[in-house]
Image (tube, grey):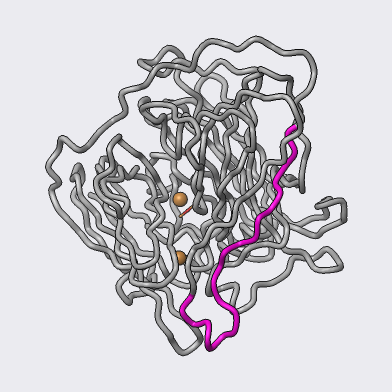
Amino acid sequence: VSSESGLLDVRLVAGRGERLVAGRRADVLGYNDGLPGPTLRVRPGDTLRIELVNRLDAPTNLHVHGLHVSPEGNGDNVFVAVQPGESFEYEHRLPDDHPPGVFWYHPHHHGNVADQVFGGLYGAIVVEDPPDAAGGAEVEVARERVLVVSDISLDESGSLKGASMQDRMMGREGDLVLANGQVMPVLEARPGERERWRVVNACVSRYLELDLGDQQLDLVARDLGPLTEPSAGEAVVLAPGNRADMVLTAVSGSTTVRLVPVDRGESGMGGMMGGDGAASDAVDLLTFEVAGTVVGGGRPLPSPVAARDLRGQEPTRRRELVLETGMGMGGMSFTFGGRAFDPDRTDQEVALEAVEDWTIRNDSSMDHPFHLHVWPMQVLDAGDGPVQDPVWRDVVNVPARGTVTVRVAFDLPGRTVYHCHVLDHEDAGMMGVVRVG
Ligand code: C2O
Ligand code: CU
Ligand code: CU
């Protein structure tokens, strides 16, 4: 669905229903009976109006992940609870200079986020490149594919499998990995054709490292807007919530696009719980069939863009946030600095227009992808020294026992959250509240 005359008006019905998954009837969740939900296409400056209808049997709401929009009122307000049978009208006004890129939407009602996303509630949002903006020349391609990657577990009868204690500790990974709701879809192209792939990691906990075999790949953007230089041959690792925007030049032959196992540490409770560690198995994601007559290459990729850079500015304040796990009464605890999420407490008070450095320290033995709502993060140090080019993220992985520093311009007022994007950890309390104003 695309916007016309600056307004995109959509209705998303969150419900449960029968769908075909891996060739079998399955009873799963979805928006508008789809898996994933519809891709929403907008442009910077547009208004995105979404009526969310809850036909689930539990409360839900809707978050627009990565969008730089107000978190207040009927904006991107994660404190709203939409009860079963009720609906809620969201309205998001994208600033005129909103970064283009691929974003996504998913439920954010604390306590059942992991279950609802795992069940099938997610969809992509594309913020189109502004035409003829400085450096923003649209990439010329034969076709564009939005690839929403998710995972799910179904039992014999096709019902959703619940999460075990171990699943909730490490973060659950599904038995099936889906590309746009399908197991191993076949995509076709002709040799020499250029395609734009916009990949969303909508998995609850699974990290994705894509292996595209012999296909020729240029990464053009991550999370929030363009890279300063398209980079060829770089490993593409997406933590939960991350996106990648890449241009592929099709090479003849049949390629199995695979997910390479990613080691994300261990819970540290292995001895007690039996089984530990979470290096997911290698998984085949899709088949890319390239055959037919060779097509000439298009124009060269757009020249490097001057990305926004906050490094010339002095931070107004520095903070340290600590990702912590521990052993509690009911199992493991997941917190920031020992304090579990409380919607009524504000953890970080930030002045409007402040530019702050946040150091995220991971005191645990597993990785945690740190996510901040509303305000893009510029990564200054990903744990191995200063980052060279401007790198913008809304989810940044903080390795086990590692530290990451980001700089953030808090240029929109409002109260919202930051959290671990392993959604089982978020539901368990690894989330805090930030208020800007
Ligand atoms: Cu993708 Cu707070 O969420
Ligand atoms: Cu988000
Ligand atoms: Cu986590």
Q: Is residue 301 magenta?
A: no
Q: Is residue 40 left or right of residue 329?
A: right
Res 140 quadrant in image: top right
Residue at x 79% of width, y 55% of height:
17
Q: Is residue 47 visible?
A: no
Q: Position of residue 2 (x, y in %)?
A: 60, 26
Vertical order, 112 against 283 (above or below)? below
Vertical order, 412 against 214 (above or below)? below
Q: Position of residue 3 (x, y in %)?
A: 57, 25
Q: Quadrant of the N terminus?
A: top right
Residue at x 76% of width, y 45% of height:
184
Q: Which residues are magenta?
A: 267-288
Q: Position of residue 117 (x, y in %)?
A: 61, 57
Q: Is residue 74 visible?
A: yes
Q: Nearer the viewer, residue 34 or 283?
A: 283
Residue at x 45% of width, y 19% of height:
130
Vertical order, 93 against 4 (above or below)? below
Q: Is residue 286 magenta?
A: yes
Residue at x 67% of width, y 52% of height:
14
Q: Is residue 110 left or right of residue 96?
A: right
Q: Nearer the viewer, residue 310 or 409?
A: 310
Q: Position of residue 376 (x, y in %)?
A: 34, 42
